[in-house]
Image (spheres, helix red, strand yellow):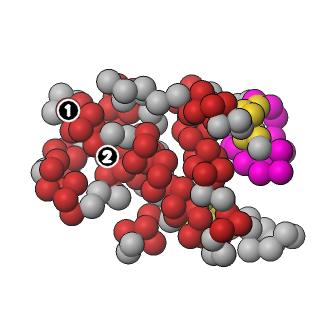
């Protein structure tokens, strides 16, 4: 099974990854410093997921896309596709139906599995058939959205936005 190491990927691209106390949020991408900072309270596979998310921000340079939400949508799509390989997900789901156990076996987090399933293309849906429908999401108390926080302008209150419905329209 492939195990993604987003911290090693960031370092290979010349991006520093720092773990420290953040005043808000789980992680930040600071382009001017080429640095990803993850809050020290985020651990294990959640840390990897946030590093992968911010790494995608580094790759999809927001300066090249005017709409900040479009950047976030590309980041979510990229993060889920690179973190949850469809063939591996299908194989594990034949043996396991609990979202937490599936995430553990794939070395990721349930939120990324949920988003990956929601983002299946018609061709991918045909490939996995009804397998992903057997995941027992009712056993998981986590969020059924994949939210990002958007800042409409510098001094605005952050607004959580569920990006999955917009991604599905692509």
Q: Which mark is residue 78?
A: none
From where the camera sits, is residue 97 visible?
Answer: no
Q: What is the x, y in percent for residue 166?
A: 45, 72
Q: Which residue is mark 2?
A: 137
Up/down of 122 relative to 34, above or below: below
Question: Please, what secondary structure does the residue beneath circle 1 have?
Answer: helix
Above or below, 111 against 152 in this view is: above
In the figure, is residue 67 to the left or right of 90?
Answer: right
Mark 2, residues whose alpha carbon is within 10 Å: few (<14), some, or many (≥20)?
some
- The residue at which mark 1 appears reads as 91
In the image, residue 6 lies at what x, y percent? 56, 33
- How many neighbours does mark 1 have within 10 angstroms: few (below 14), some (14-19), or many (20 or more)? few
Report the residue at 63% width, 75% height from top.
67
SS of the residue at dot 2?
A: helix
Q: Which residues are magenta?
A: 19-33
Q: Position of residue 140 (x, y in %)?
A: 38, 41
Q: Residue furthest right?
A: 155
Q: Position of residue 95 (x, y in %)?
A: 18, 28
């Amino acid at each position: 099974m492939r195990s993604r190491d987003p911290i090693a990927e960031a370092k290979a691209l010349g991006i520093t990854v720092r773990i420290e106390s953040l005043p808000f949020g789980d992680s930040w991408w600071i382009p001017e410093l080429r640095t990803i900072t993850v809050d020290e309270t985020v651990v294990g596979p959640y840390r990897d997921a946030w590093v992968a998310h911010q790494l995608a921000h580094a790759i999809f340079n927001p300066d090249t896309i005017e709409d900040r939400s479009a950047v976030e949508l590309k980041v979510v799509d990229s993060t889920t596709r690179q973190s949850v390989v469809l063939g591996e997900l299908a194989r594990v789901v034949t043996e396991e139906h609990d979202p937490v156990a599936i995430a553990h076996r794939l070395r990721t987090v349930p939120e990324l599995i949920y988003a990956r399933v929601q983002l299946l293309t018609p061709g991918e849906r045909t490939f996995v058939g009804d397998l992903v429908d057997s995941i027992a999401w009712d056993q998981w108390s986590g969020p059924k959205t994949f939210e990002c926080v958007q800042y409409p302008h510098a001094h605005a209150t952050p607004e959580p936005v569920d990006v999955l419905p917009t991604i599905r329209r692509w």
